[in-house]
Image (tube, rainbow, N blue to C red):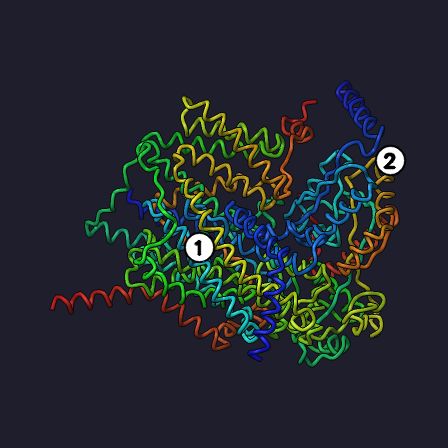
Amino acid sequence: MFRKLAMATVLVMVFAGSALAAFPGRNFECIAPAGPGGGWDTTMRMVARVLTEKGIVGRAMPVINKPGGGGGVALAYINARKDPHTIAVYSPPLLLINLTGQTELSYKNVTPLAMLINDFGAFAVPKDSPYKNINDLFDAIREDPKSVKLGGTSSPGSMDHIQFLHAAKAAGVDVKGIPYIAFQGGEALAALLGSHIDVYTTGMAEVVGPLEAGDIRVLAITSPERIKEGPLAQVPTLKEQGVDAVFINWRGIFGIPNMPEEARNFMEDALKKMSETPEWAEICARNGWTQVFMGSSEFSAFLEKTNEEYKSLLETIGLYQQAKN
Amino acid sequence: MEANVMQNLMLGFSVAMKWQNFGMMIVGSALGTVLGMLPGLGPSTGIALLLPLTFVMPPEMALITMCAVYYGAMFGGSRSSILLNIPGDGAAVASCFDGYPMAQQGRAEAALAISAIASFIGGLISCVAFVAVAVPVARFALRFGPPEYFVLMIFALAATAAISKEAILKGLISMCIGLMLTTVGIDLQSGVQRFTFGSVELQSGIDFVVVIIGVYGLGEILKEYQTLRMKGEASVQKKFGRIWISWNDWKRCWLPMLRQTPIGFFIGVLPGAGGTIAAMMSYNNEKQLSRHPEEFGKGAIEGLAAPEAANNACSIGAMIPMFTLGIPGSGTTAVMLGALMIYGLQPGPLLFQNNPEIAWGVIASLFLANVICAIINIPLAGLLVRVLAVPPRVLYPLVIGMAFLGVYTINYSAAEFLLLTLLGLLGYFMKCYKIPTAPLILAVVVGANMEQSFRQALLMSDGSGAIFFRSAICNVLWFLAAISIAWPFISDWLQKRKNVARAA
Amino acid sequence: MRRDTVVGLFSVLLGGLYGAATLQIRDATIGNPWSPRVFPLGISVFLILLGVAALVVDRKKASAGHRESASGAKDPGCIKLIVGTVVLCGAYGFAFEPLGYILSTLCFMFCLLTLVNEPKRWVANIVITLIFTFALWGTFVYVFDIMLPSFNLEEVRGWIGGGI
């Protein structure tokens, strides 16, 4: 028993030693926890592209798609990896799939390296809706929670659902009885345009087109400040309407659990350099992402705080679930 | 207004005919055809992989290339259906029903030709319809809410299960098995896991492409093993004729193509339905309208022409909600929408005002890509048809290998390999016990959406079932569903009466 | 046993098992707790009813002296082919990620061809295996830019039980 342990220790040290000798020592594996084409995939591909093209990393960074389980499949994969040359992109679902019991793995099973992008939510109603601003809507819910049909993309307890509840709770609304109807893909927007639902909670990018065309009205966005340009510049934030709430759809890069100190520092530094390039700024502008940078330790603290916030929201509506296993 | 449309269309053609754009269109069409042929790889994967192009190309060029790939994949999807009985994607399932029997009877040339011709005609008519009626049609499609979708899917399933009086029970059993497969995974409305048995891979459900490749492709090969060594080398086709159809074939097909195109087109405009439903519905519809329904499934050429015309019409129809309302009608258009956004272009009616060169350029490129695909596909078919010269004892292992690789690219994981094998066995036993597989396939395609529409509708009505009869659309669809179930009995009765009359 | 009898019995059994599994689904915490079970339960009941109907129709036909059409002639050796293919496919699934695409596909294709295309054509089998494996690998990696798994030491170690 002891001998086996000693052998293992030696092996680990040899491995760790060789890894420490020079990081990066080989090509990377960049995980997009979803199929090609979505937000996670695009972010991972863009990050890998700038990192290699600007020669910041000096190793190839092929992107590998590992969809499934709302990101849970990729999370299980990363958690089992021992090689620090593995990075992945994640956003709020990393916390949510754990809090709703889909996986027992959580943000503690990955090493946060850097937060790179912020995006915000939007609440839209049909153009002939009786609700003129966010407070009209919250008043109606206060009167009769069942009178307002809330729709969004993907299941209850997901980001779209949570961001609305977060705002409603901050406005002092009892969030328990609000019916939430889940759709897939573009169906939710179609349901809103056809007035089959009353409110659509989604990301900002999804509402710009129909807003510009005058098909919908956007009651509020969840950003801390107004958007500077484009059609969304007309839309007030929650704060402007007296609701003290901000909801950030953050996106960041993560490494394997217990990542060696040196590898973590290297990647944090590389990502910082990347976020300062004009190429990255242009990519963010093109995709409508708000560019931010938050380093590893600060990001960890942020995740801890955010996790508690989500948890208390999910507890209120009864969706919080300790994963079995 | 008329003059305006023509003027805009001319502007579009001038953009699409620029030599760089035209060249990319040819490359895209060819690449799309190849992608479409490989099982598992469909247009949405193809376009997603092309997204990086958007960084090196001007927007109209990138979009034209993507459209060409989309289009090529729709053309290519049916190649492997006809030659190998493995549909390249869901929309090509219905092409197996009569395409594969035709190839087995030595009429592969005619089958490949008619599928290209039908695709071309369906596409061309839809392009014209796109220009003429895009906006009003898209507005009408918005009236389809969850209850309407639910009844629409009931109709689609009823029509497929009730293929014949004898098989109606087995057809419905097959449908139930398909619906069961769709209930696996996290329930969209409640977040509860169902039938996942603790597996992370199963949380996102069973991809219908895996079911199609397993039940159809692998199941068929296992069934063919029964006679593999008995037939010897005799079944191999060694001589190939010209890829074209006879006058007689043409006479049988022109009407089916023309009448199934509008069905496909409208289903494409609905955001909740796709090419598979369009192809299946047009196949059923054609069978019911046909004067010799007994030939369907045994190599009836119109049984291939109808779904081919409809699924291409559907792929054009699916672009309407994307361009006019900013709503993606399918997975593929969702990825294209993403590409538009990367350029900071907002899809919607304003796209036609603010960026006419892009909106109309893309529409014009649809016309041209349609022609290019038809031209590429005829000589390509001459090459592909030689697949049939490979003896089955070599061909089958190769097809199995391709099927696995195709399945790998769905989720980039080998977790589905076991599932694929089990589904192959399921398909084998279904064929042995003469249970039709088509209702299972359609149920797998619509099942998840059907349950969700049902639940969404009940959430909207606070649990009252009256919502399923709330609109004229619902009632018409219920009526059509009832007719479909009753149709085999009605046509039987009509036939008998005719015979009695003749005897007298 | 008659074919349709088997189909009927199978439907009843499958419907029953599926129904039992449906009852194991957790209560929904949002909305009606029964909502995730309604649709599957409906399928289960419907399938059982269909199975019973199939059995009834079949009994009626059998007592009316109706004979089923014979299922075409079968090669008695086909069981070996079917079982062999299924086993190989399963093994391929387990080997694909740890061994990587190239190694596992070479083995899989060669074994499958040996089984279906007879061992005596081994030269052809080797050539086809090599062409198939590398041609598809080239197409995926270079044309479509899709990464295929490569030999993975970590996973192989986990796979053979972490012996070292």
List the residue tagged with mark 1: B116
Mark pair 2, 1: CA separation: 59 Å
Q: Which mark is residue A262?
A: 2
Identify which residue is drawn at 75% across, 38% down.
A60
Residue C44 position (above or below residue A49): below
Residue A11 position (above or below residue A317): above
**Crowd class of label 1 (few under 14; some 14 to 19; many from 20; radius 10 Å):** many
* Letter of the chain that mark 1 sits on in the rendering: B
Residue B323 position (above or below residue A83): below
Locate residue B69, reporting x and y percent: 57, 53
- Is residue A177 visible in the rendered structure shown here? no
Badge 1 amino acid: Ala
Locate residue B390, reporting x and y percent: 40, 35
Looking at the rendered structure, the secondary structure element under dot 1 is helix
Q: Nearer the viewer, residue B341 or C29?
A: B341
Residue A21 position (above or below residue A43): above
For residue B247, side relative to residue B149 (left or right): left
